[in-house]
Image (tube, rainbow, N blue to C red):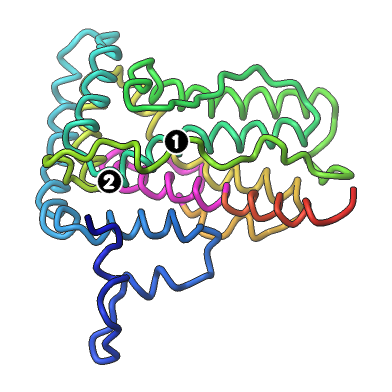
Amino acid sequence: MKTLPNFLLDDHNPADPSPWLALYLDDSSPLSDEIKQAWLTDSASPSRQFLMPVVRPLARAFIVLFQLVKALLPKGWQAPAFLHKILAEGLKAWVTPQANWMILRHFHFGSDILAFIAANAGVQIPSRPLRPMNLDDLKDNLFVQHDLNLFNFVIYLNRALHEQDRALAPPARLDLSMVNECPVQLRDMPRGRLNFIDLQTAIEIFTPTYQLLLTDNDFWRASNSLQLDETIGIYCARLTGMPEHLVMLNNKHPLVPESTLRAGYRLVLHGLSTEMLHGLLLQLKAQQAVRPA
């Protein structure tokens, strides 16, 4: 069975260079070769090239339609358990192994990053780390809980800092013990004949479903949470004294809410931003391991 993508198997042609090979070889980002290969394999898929341009405008039209439908439904109408079952089963049945792997990694890395900030800020913050080991674990309300964790973290952290009349600053020595590689492996992801839909297309498909089966408040909160990427990056930059923790975290200013029509695209940026930030912290952990305490 072929294990390498075409852009790594084909000979380089200077007259027709592969953009995927260029992005894979580029070392300006902190992503490991393994995750870059998975990300670019997914991005170079036929699904991403041919299906997503059709799906994206339809998905955005459904977002508008469902907004009108939700106006006619009872305000508190929602079906989160059904939503998470649809998401988990849909991912298992239709989505590429690379995309499913990146989705599971995202929950682990988000939990690692929040734990890093809390530990090095020196504050006690109630938390519910999310560490799914398989796609069925997502059924435990993980997508909604992910958004709740993020907003609650920002509230708890800043309240504690305000009460202590201090700001985030680098500690004497960073605690990076909670920053680790994800235990979930790509080889364990479903690989059926129908697992062909790439990450970006899958997100565009699932976003209107997310909107329909949650309350307006939950959907708006989920959409607005994407703009906290730079906020979390700033926290890490202040703790590490390294402004590169803001590199490529570009989901726009948190005080200017974006339209929910672009939520699918911005969710992809959110996932990649988390990978970038976690990769930087892993590099910092490796550097610290070779320095004396």
Q: Residue at x 30, y 62 (%)?
A: 4
At label 2, counting other C-alpha atoms closer than 10 Å, the crowd grade (few under 14, some 14-19, many 20 or more) is many
Q: Residues within 10 Å of mark 1 (few under 14, many from 20)?
A: some
Question: How far from the left and from the top, in percent, is residue 209?
Answer: 20, 27
Query: How far apart are the alpha carbons under marks 1 and 2?
Result: 17 Å
> Where residue 287 appears, x then y in whole percent?
74, 57
- What residue is disc 2 on? 199
Q: Amino acid at mark 2?
A: Leu
Magenta stretch bounds: 251-278
| Left or right of residue 31, residue 6 in this image | left
Kindly state the secondary structure of the residue where label 1 is placed. Answer: loop
In the orientation shown, which residue stands out farthest toward the bottom? 15
User: Magenta stretch containing residue 258, yes or no?
Assistant: yes
In front of the other: 6 or 143: 6
Residue at disc 2, secondary structure: helix
| Res. 290 image quadrant | bottom right
Residue 30: % across, % down: 55, 60
Quadrant of the frame with the N terminus:
bottom left
Q: Measured from the top left, where is residue 102 in percent x and y?
A: 39, 43
On the image, which quarter does residue 242 sit in?
bottom right
Marks 1,2: beta carbons within 8 A: no
**Horizontal side of residue 100 vs 45, given as left or right:** right
Q: Residue at x 60, y 35 (%)?
A: 112
Residue holding disc 1: 184
